[in-house]
Amino acid sequence: KAGVTQTPRYLIKTRGQQVTLSCSPISGHRSVSWYQQTPGQGLQFLFEYFSETQRNKGNFPGRFSGRQFSNSRSEMNVSTLELGDSALYLCASTSGGTGELFFGEGSRLTVL
Amino acid sequence: DAKTTQPNSMESNEEEPVHLPCNHSTISGTDYIHWYRQLPSQGPEYVIHGLTSNVNNRMASLAIAEDRKSSTLILHRATLRDAAVYYCILFMIYNQGGKLIFGQGTELSVKP
């Protein structure tokens, strides 16, 4: 079956702009979570959605937001971009529970 | 949040076993121990997970200490394709969902 798909794969923005990233989970998976990966901070949890509801949230400012649609696809949005937001943003899906998460290849955001 | 501690890097010879250690002394009773690995320019890939008992799958074995404060990922015969960053992660259960708390990972290099 198809894996987790993230779009766009690469994008460049300037400070102050906003960006929306998209994630299509594996068919049948209802939980989608987002992670930020930077060289300095490593992988950090952003938030998790399940059945269109945000279930958990990491320690990121309110500029980072997300949502999930009825088909389980998810988007995350970052407003008023800062240079420090340059990172690889990873989406992961799971059918639920405590088992395996399936990650996409990520969206690499560069803020100039 | 509980944290994991891993060596920054390890080396192995091809076709030899590899033992990757991880300390998680502040683990709570409901945290699962997950291992993922990440190749350059890819999202993390699930390797194995467990709660209390040792676990085996086609990729690796996971040995969990009796007090759960440490664990070891065992690759039985390293191949060149096993060269990656290996993350020992705690899966923390919150609000019926969960989040992965990543450490800094161990970069494994495999010599032919």
Image (tube, rainbow, N blue to C red):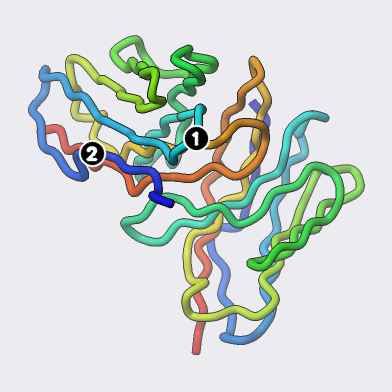
Query: Within the image, what quadrant is residue A16 found in?
Result: top left
Q: Residue at x 67, y 63 (%)?
A: B20
* Residue type of the residue flagged with mark 2: Thr
Whole-percent x, y for residue B30 in the image: 78, 29
Of residues A111 and B77, the one drawn nearer to the viewer in this rendering: B77
Q: Residue furthest right?
A: B66
Please give left or right for residue A10 compared with residue B13 in the image: left
Q: Is residue B92 left or right of residue A9?
A: right
Chain ID, mark 1: A
Residue type, label 1 = Gly
The total number of labels drawn is: 2
Q: Badge 1: how crowded within 10 Å, few (<14), some, or many (20+)?
A: few
- Identify residue for label 1: A28
Residue A72 against residue B54 in the figure, above or below = above
Q: Quadrant of residue A103?
A: top left
Task: Please provide percent x and percent y for residue A12.
Answer: 11, 37
Residue carrying label 2: A7
Residue at left offset 70%, top offset 76%: B76
